[in-house]
Image: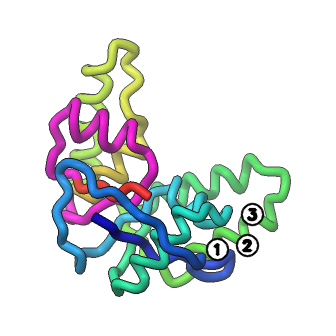
Amino acid sequence: MTSTTPTRTKRNWRRSNRRQRLTAGTSANWRSEMILDTNFLIALDTGMPSAVRTAREIERQGRPRRVPEIVVYELWVAVGKGTETAQNRQKYERLLDGLPTVGFTSAVMKRAGELEGEAQAADPNASGVGAADAIVAATALELDEPVVTDDERDFVNRMQEHLGYTDLRVELY
């Protein structure tokens, strides 16, 4: 199946379409909103062709998209770590402009904590999937919306397949 996401240029959604695979546990609810992961937004900002194609397709389909607040946090960590802080801040502001954010709710945080705990318990190194990915996944689960990401290892292999979160819908770009 093919699906894509609206892309923004560095000022707006980037232009391009990208083929996305729907993974196990995904359903073809093409009108649902999309949860955008940090990896997707960074790939979009850098002009990665697959992310740009995906973004264009999402936009073409008129699918609304949302950004979890933890994703905003992760982007701003990159702003703080970078050497071009003002420039990075401006480009991420433009990238996020007009995209609604999804805040932390008690239900999302409880689900994220449980998911991360299960991931740590199932991992011999107790590394889990990380708080940010757990929060993004929990947001998608609570809102019953797919996540757009390229993080197949954590979202598909670990959460869907290994931990059994088959209701987590993931669209890979």
Q: Which residue is mark 2?
A: 90
Distance (Cα) linking label 1 and label 3? 8 Å
Q: Which residue shows up at 35% across the image and 80% down it?
A: 64
> Is 153 inside the magenta-drawn segment?
yes
94 over 112 or under it: above or below? below
| Amino acid type, label 2 | Gln
Judge by depth and name the residue closer to the eye, 15 or 92. 15
The image quadrant where one finds the C terminus is: bottom left
Sort mark 3 into few (<14), some (14-19) or many (20+) by Cα contacts within 10 Å: some
> Is 170 inside the magenta-drawn segment?
no
Judge by depth and name the residue closer to the eye, 151 or 89. 151
Q: Which residue is mark 1?
A: 93
Q: Which residue shows up at 46% across the image and 69% down it?
A: 54
Badge 2 element: helix
Does 40 sit left or right of 141 as displayed? Answer: right
Q: Are marks 1 and 2 in contact (CB under 8 Å)?
A: yes
Q: Which residue is mark 3?
A: 88
Write down the region rendered in magenta.
Answer: 142-168
Badge 1 element: helix
Badge 3 element: helix
| Amino acid type, label 3 | Asn
Q: Which residue shows up at 65% across the image and 68% down it?
A: 92
Q: Which residue shows up at 39% across the image and 77% down it?
A: 58
Distance (Cα) linking label 1 and label 2? 5 Å
Q: Quadrant of residue 66?
A: bottom left
Residue 84 percent location from the top left of the image: 83, 58
Residue 106 appears in view: no
54 over 171 or under it: above or below? below
124 over 156 or under it: above or below? above
Judge by depth and name the residue closer to the eye, 153 or 139. 153
